[in-house]
Image (spheres, rainbow, N blue to C red):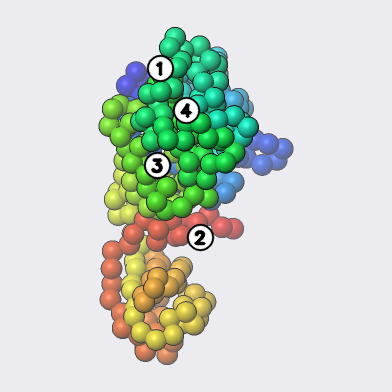
Amino acid sequence: MSDALVIDARDLHKTYGTRKVVDGLTLAVTPGQICGFLGANGSGKTTTIRMLCGLVKPDSGGGTCLGMDILTDAQKIRLQIGYMTQRFSFYDDLTVTENLEFVAEVYGMANPKQAVAGILERMGLRDRADQLAGELSGGWKQRLALAACVLHKPKLLLLDEPTSGVDAKARREFWDLIHDMAGEGLTVLVSTHYMDEAARCSRIVYLSEGKLVVQGTPDEVVQASKLITFVATGANLDATAVKLRTMPGVESAAVFGAQMHIAGMNRAALEQARASPVGAALTWHEVPPVLEDVFIHLLSDSKP
């Protein structure tokens, strides 16, 4: 066990009924890292996060979080982390300030009003301090939730799909705040479905059916995939993509504006699809894969 690791989980298992939700997961996260947790719904991300903060007890395996044992020190761990769930879980009939003051009292902070004033300023919530939480838009609710999670100055932040359902501008601003705090030493483990968010992580971990499939920096994950991708331009791209998806070796065919991307692992099969009557009318060129291509590839591999 390394004292340098903020998260050091080893061989975690969790089963509900006959379903293995987490199956032998080992995870290490270093200080100041933003670690992205990726995977399809039901891949074990939320259960893993809950095991790390002591809300769910693993069936077997163990490890440490902030140097404390996840099996025996769960209560101590929860006092030193920030955990943001998928669902907004604050009081709609209290103001932003009242919600944060309540959180400060829960953590027994010495100067709650001063702490709340500081976090309102940092999170850009000062102008909404007296607004009822239930009247906030999705983006501002997420910002309030983040403020509550870091009010007690945790050393680790666990975020479970924190920007689901908010607009692109709010997502970008949210991530700017995350990076600002990571730059000050905060360690972050965040689950997300958004590839632009995954690309902003210093490291990503991909789960499938409770097992770790791949991990590394975004660039390392892309390069390790060995995925082959081509881009096409021309007419009737939507109809062509539908036909190309049925061809052997074409794992994905997706239209992005005036271009279509196809991807797969078999170069010969992709070349054959390009040369077929369906693909021959288009103009093609090979491009490096991007993280979204790899994510779709991994999703395809995980399907039975």
Q: Quadrant for the N terminus, please.
A: top left
Under mark 3, the amino acid is Phe
In this rendered view, identify the residue nearer to me: 94 or 154. Answer: 94
In this view, 67 is above or below 174 = above
Query: Which is more N-terminal, label 2 or label 1?
Result: 1
Q: Which residue is mark 3?
A: 174
In this view, 233 is above or below 253 = below
Rendering coords of residue 273 (x, y %): 41, 80
Under mark 4, the amino acid is Cys
Write the residue at 42% across / 35% down.
Answer: 127
Q: Nearer the viewer, mark 3 or mark 2?
A: 3
Q: Nearer the viewer, mark 1 or mark 2?
A: 1
Rendering coords of residue 126 (x, y %): 41, 32
Rendering coords of residue 22 (x, y %): 57, 37
Q: Which residue is mark 1?
A: 114
Does residue 102 appear in the picture of this structure?
yes
Q: Secondary structure at mark 1?
A: helix
**Res. 110 image quadrant:** top left
Rendering coords of residue 134 (x, y %): 59, 38
In this view, 162 is above or below 94 = below
